[in-house]
Amino acid sequence: MKFEEALKRIEEIVKRLEEGEVDLEESIALFEEGMRLVKMCERMLEEAERKIEVLTVEEDGTKRLEPFEED
């Protein structure tokens, strides 16, 4: 499943739970599915962050790649 698909499904789950028209068993099942999707999205974001590299130009005009660093 792609990140965008998982995020859309999470939004659908939240909407259904907020409507309050599902029984307890279905609410629990939806909550569990949502939590699995959230964890999957977190893993995807962490992996993407590790892959990000910033392209910089040296004073002499050469280019080099550096690992992405958060401020």
Image (cartoon, helix red, strand yellow):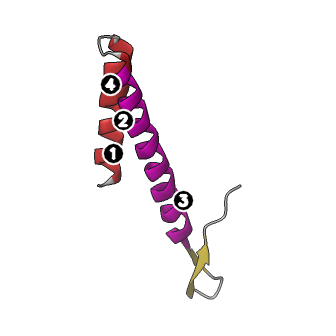
Q: Amino acid at mark 3?
A: Glu
Mark 1: secondary structure? helix
Query: Up-down: is 13 above or below 64?
Result: above
Q: Quadrant of the N terminus?
A: bottom left
Name the kind of residue labelled 2 in the image: Ile
Residues shaded magenta: 25-54
Q: Upstream in the sequence, badge 4 or badge 1?
A: 1
Q: Secondary structure at mark 3?
A: helix
Picture disc at residue 6? 1
Proximity of marks 4 and 3: CB atoms separated by less than 8 Å:
no
Circle nearer the viewer, 4 or 3: 4
Q: Can you tell which of label 2 and label 4 is closer to the viewer? A: 4
Q: Would you name the residue on which mark 4 appears?
A: 26
Mark nearer the N terminus (2 vs 3): 2
Amino acid type of the residue that numbered disc 4 sits on in the rendered structure: Glu
Q: Residue at x 54, y 72 (%)?
A: 53
In which quadrant will I find the C terminus?
Answer: bottom right
The x, y position of residue 11, in whole percent, is 34, 31
The earlier-in-sequence mark between 3 and 1 is: 1
Residue position for label 2: 10
Nearest to the observer: residue 27 or residue 17 = 27
Image spot of residue 43 (x, y percent): 50, 57
